Amino acid sequence: MKYLPIDSSLFVKNRKNFAAQMKPNSMAVFNSNDIYPISADSTMPFEQHRDIFYLSGVDQEESVLVLFPDCPNEELREVLFLRETNEHIAVWEGEKLTKEAAFTTSGIKTVYWLQDLEKVIFEMSTYCDTFYINTNEHYRANVETETREDRFTKWLLAKYPGHSVAKSNPILQRLRSVKDQIELDLMQHACNITEKGFRRILSFVKPGVWEYEIEAELLHEFVRNRSKGFAYTPIIASGNNANVLHYIENNQQCKEGDLILFDIAAEYANYKSDLSRTIPVSGRYTQRQKDVYNAVLRVKNEATKLLVPGAFWKEYHVEVGKLMTSELLGLGLIDKADVQNEDPKWPAYKKYFMHGTSHHIGLDTHDYGLLYEPIEANMVFTVEPGIYIPDEGFGVRLEDDVVVQSQGEPFNLMGNIPIEADEIEELMNS
């Protein structure tokens, strides 16, 4: 891993918080992700399952975490299983966790090699009544590939059909949505790396540059600052490409007079940042572009103030819709008749702002969080309004990541990243 070691107290605390919500005499199991094949002997880069990472800090394949807080054998209350490493593996694949290194990383004292898994699970199963299985119940989940977690769950329930079954996901949805200070520091670091990348391209962009050249500049800056790279597939959308919400081809030339909509950000230690900015290719916004830009910025600033403890995600979006409606009226994009005759299920503003304003962010870009429960302090949200005008050949989206505070306005993790139109023009022309 490129990132610096994380204080194991984070993972100790996360396991303690999870165990406190388990049923009596129950056992929870968490698996690493697979390394997914492409074809021949090619594989995709490994990405750790966020749940086992959240609970242990272990960031390698073929690892299993078992939690059994009521186990009568105290040594089996927290158990980590790892693929056995040796000199051959170290030469061909690189260093893997030893049992000693796994303890340093996770704070877990009992570490077995993976070949002991079935034997130890059998012993633990004789003590417990309930298995917690780890299913993916994120509201955006659409998984077609059978995961290592899925395969293990099938094996476990077939092997031990007499046990009751409970779900880990509802517990994790709540725990992961509220960030520890160590997590906030890691996310701030990811945002700081993103800032470096964005400032780099402000001096790089000019008429004639290609979108993929900008992508390369960003990747260079991210990786040289200990990031694996982009937190998600980057969007670098010049001109009318900005009106395709998930434009990821990044293969067009940037033309004088156009805007470039960026949705780009770095990860750090598996924690994500998520930034959107919109800049002029030639270093100056036209008056119309600036008017739309400032309208989006006003919505973003006012929407941020609405993210307070006790608010509800669904109601928050209704209020943001009212803010956007006012701005679109001011820009002449909609009129009062459009608003009076709108379909409540698809309000008039949705013609120009068709996506949501905010989502949880953390170990995943669209992180865990139960949307029907009230917002809490130390949740982290994006705030990302946009106005998209295909008929005028441009779109504007602005986005920051903010931490909900117990009192007052949210803290902006991206507060140092340029966003005012005048500042962006000044930096591009300095």
Image (cartoon, rainbow, N blue to C red):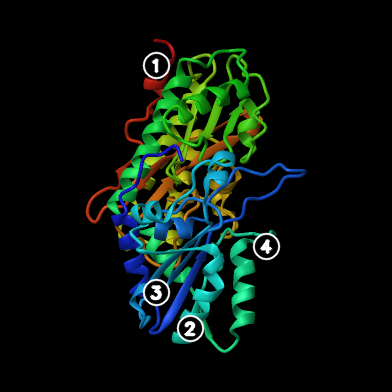
Q: Which residue is mark 3?
A: 76
Within 10 Å of disc 1 (Cα), the crowding (few <14, some 14-19, many 20+) is few
Q: Please tell me in which quadrant of the rendered image residue 162 appears.
A: bottom right
Q: Residue at x 58, y 12 (%)?
A: 207
> Is residue 175 visible in the rendered structure shown here?
yes
Q: Which residue is mark 4?
A: 146
Judge from the rendering whether residue 256 lies leftward or rightward of residue 132; answer left or right.
right
| Disc nearer the start of the sequence (3/1) | 3
Q: Which residue is mark 2?
A: 130
Q: Secondary structure at mark 4?
A: loop
User: Looking at the picture, which amino acid does disc 4 mark?
Assistant: Glu
The label on residue 427 is 1
Whole-number angstrom distance, CA of label 3 to CA of label 4: 29 Å
User: Looking at the picture, which amino acid does disc 3 mark?
Assistant: Leu
- The nearer-to-camera label among 3 and 1 is 3
> x and y percent of residue 62 in the render?
56, 57
Q: Residue at x 64, y 81 (%)?
A: 158
Query: Residue furthest toward the top?
Result: 430
- The nearer-to-camera label among 1 and 4 is 4
